[in-house]
Amino acid sequence: MLKLARYLKEFKLNVTIGPLCKLIEAIFELIVPLVMAQIIDKGITNRDETFIWQNGIILIILAVCGLLFALVCQYMASAASQGVGTRLRSDLYAHINTLSYKELDAIGSSALVTRVTNDVNQVQTAVAMLIRLVVRAPFLVIGATIMSFSISPGLSLIFFGTMAAIVLIMYPIMKATVKLFKKQQRSLDGISRITRENLSGIRVVRAFSRQDYEKSRFGAEAEEYRKFAVKAGRINALLNPAIFIVVNTAYLLIVWIGGGFAAQGADGLTQGKIIALVNYMTQISLALVVVANLVTIFTKAAASSARINEVFDMKTSITSPEHSPVQDKNAPAVSFNDVHFSYSTGDEALEGVSFELFRGETLGIIGGTGSGKSTLVNLMCRFYDTSEGTIKINGADIREYPLGELRRIISVVPQKAELLSGSLRENMTLGRSDISDEQIQKAFEIAQAKEFTDTLEDGLDTKVLQGGKNFSGGQKQRLTIARAIAQNSEILILDDSSSALDYATDAKLRKSIGELPLTRVIISQRANSILHADKIIVLDDGKVVGMGNHAQLLKSCAVYREICLTQYSEDEIRETEAAN
């Protein structure tokens, strides 16, 4: 938690005034038993109503002043905790956005969501308790002990014995719950992961009638969380009864022994002083219960802080240079030189990939599922860095480009069509705010999206629901293609982005994109989508097993021919071969 203490620097005033106000409130609280003792010993014993009223007014003043100082402390604690939580959550979210795909894959999106929400809330609660109670509770324990010693040094030994017994009770209980709280947080990650998968894949779940299975899967994870919570709750439930047994025993000893002393007139004890001692014991017991709860809160916060710091300590493996490299306009637009890449599993996803793509050309990439097609695109966009080999754009290594400039050079349409909540215009201008409505409409026309965008009542101001759920799969694909085209980049990458389109629309789309003055990279499972590409790369298990145009590959690459045979008849293949 000390690493996150830097967030308190902006709230020095709150951290100073808040505990100070709580300290003053505690002082007033410690004075109350002494005033009560005076009322009993002098006012009630001597039947002096004036004295009782005067001291009663003092009690009211102490209570009102204590309330005012408590309210000030409460305000300071709320402002500081909410401020720390807001800044911590913002910084954590910003840091997550600097991480590359490699780090995001390692930690998992559901775990990151839990850390940004639940874990930050735990730290936020700890900050509030730090200001409100960390000073007050120990001060009350120490102050009440000192005051009891000033009243009766003999009976104060009961206080020391009581505190020692309570500490011996608290330590094993707190120690036993620490591990359980950490397991609870990990189990919460699992609940978040399953919930996220279920909600994002709800159509798939229902299509395969897997609701009961998903319910049981969620129930099992929730049951795991419940077990940890109940076990920790059961252990914590022992705390208050055990403390109150000790405290009530102390009450009996004070009244029994103190009553005997008072009857004998020993140690200067009176009835009022005995009542004061009982009040101080009550204050100590309540303060120790608060301390026990604080230990629980700070234990949870410590576990959450460790998880948050784990994210902050994670540095991105993708660094962005400050200056642009020197580009060679005569060099290939894209070149791969003996590129190898492995994910964290260790197996090579790409092995020895080399090719060149010149300006204005179209590159088609085809291969079976898991052959490395999308991995190749991710490397070209530098979402990951290569394990070996180099990738160059316009003759310069992509690692020499500032990431912002590289993203302007390359526009990519991902395999999964994603739209963000907001307006249609906001989705079309992602990455660039200077795109005009005319450019967007032109992009709609090229992407074959005008047929439905022109029917939208609010036009570009049409609201897009989360994930674009108010558009069909084909509409979302065309909108994401239009979004990439509107960027007016040098290189356009389509990662199997027309899979939801019918053949006629796909053909029109390819024709209109083919007329654009840019370099195109098309990944597709459909052979007809890359049929007329200047160069086609055939991938199989991460390796290039064929490279050339359609006619050349039909003769030289068995894998490519096999793919074509699954989609065309022999006669159709001969026709396409002759046409090329």
Image: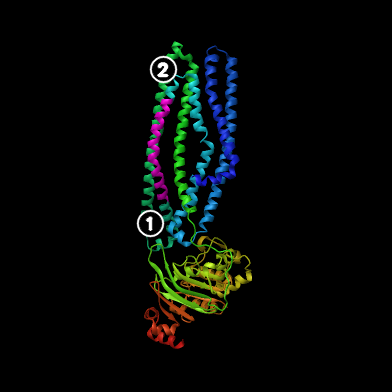
Left or right of residue 66, residue 104 in this image: left
Rounded to the nearest angstrom, the CA distance separating label 2 from label 1 is: 64 Å
Question: Vertical placement of 510 versus 19: above or below?
Answer: below
**Can residue 247 be seen in the rendering of this structure?**
no
Image-based side of 445 in relation to 545, left or right: right
- Using residue 446 as the reference point, say whether residue 301 is left or right of it: left
Magenta-highlighted residues: 160-188
Q: Amino acid at mark 1?
A: Glu
* Front residue of this view, candidates 326 and 103: 326
Q: Is residue 173 magenta?
A: yes
Instruction: Give the mark count.
Output: 2
Residue holding disc 2? 257
User: What secondary structure is the magenta-colored segment mainly?
Assistant: helix
In the image, residue 317 lies in the stretch drawn in magenta? no
The residue that disc 1 covers is 214
Can residue 479 be seen in the rendering of this structure? yes
Where residue 105 appears, as percent x and y from the top left, is 44, 60
Name which of mark 2 and mark 1 comes first in the sequence. Answer: 1
